[in-house]
């Protein structure tokens, strides 16, 4: 499972536009943006790839980061990969990207 990274504790209105970890998208809007069904998004939650935050009313809310992950899974599924395998691939890709980012930061400090 990819841990959802936390953004600022209480981002201001302007910061929310730039915060890729701010849960700005409802399930319906996210499904529309991805061109997929809401059940597909629920399956990613069940597979442990993404864990959307919940609104006070209990509705799922997605971040831009989560939508990027879901988009990549959708691409793999459309190519014939099983959802569970696609989630694992995306998890590993995301972990590799994060490790490369951290390595670049450490090299820049030297």
Image (cartoon, rainbow, N blue to C red):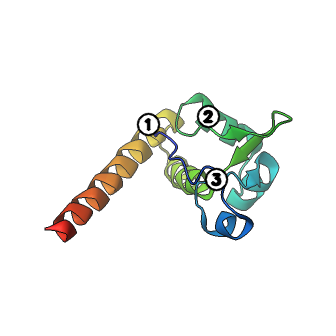
N-terminal of the two: label 2 or label 3?
A: 2
Q: Is residue 44 left or right of residue 62?
A: left
Q: Nearer the viewer, residue 95 or 22?
A: 22
Where residue 63 is drawn, which disc sits there?
Answer: 3
Position of residue 91 in the picture relative to residue 54 (left or right): left
| Screen quadrant of the C terminus | bottom left
Q: Nearer the viewer, residue 17 or 32?
A: 17
Residue 58: name its quadrant: top right
Q: Earlier in the sequence, mark 3 or mark 1?
A: 3
Quarter residue 13 falls in: bottom right
Answer yes or no: do the residues labelled 2 and 3 have beta carbons within 8 Å?
A: no
Q: Residues within 10 Å of mark 2 (few under 14, many from 20)?
A: some
Instruction: Name the spot of residue 83 as percent of width and height, x first.
Output: 53, 37
Give the label, 3 or 1, closer to the camera.
3
Q: Where is residue 71? Give x, y as percent.
A: 57, 55
Residue, disc 1: 85
């Amino acid at each position: 499972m990819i841990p959802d990274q936390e953004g600022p504790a209480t981002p201001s209105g302007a910061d929310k536009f730039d915060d890729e970890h701010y849960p700005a998208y409802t399930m319906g809007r996210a499904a529309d943006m991805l061109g997929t069904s809401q059940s597909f998004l629920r399956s990613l939650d069940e597979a442990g790839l993404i864990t959307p935050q919940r609104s006070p009313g209990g509705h799922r809310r997605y971040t831009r980061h989560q939508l990027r992950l879901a988009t990549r899974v959708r691409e793999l599924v459309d190519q014939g990969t099983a959802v569970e395998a696609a989630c694992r691939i995306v998890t590993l890709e995301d972990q590799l990207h994060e490790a490369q980012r951290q390595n670049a930061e450490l090299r820049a400090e030297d």
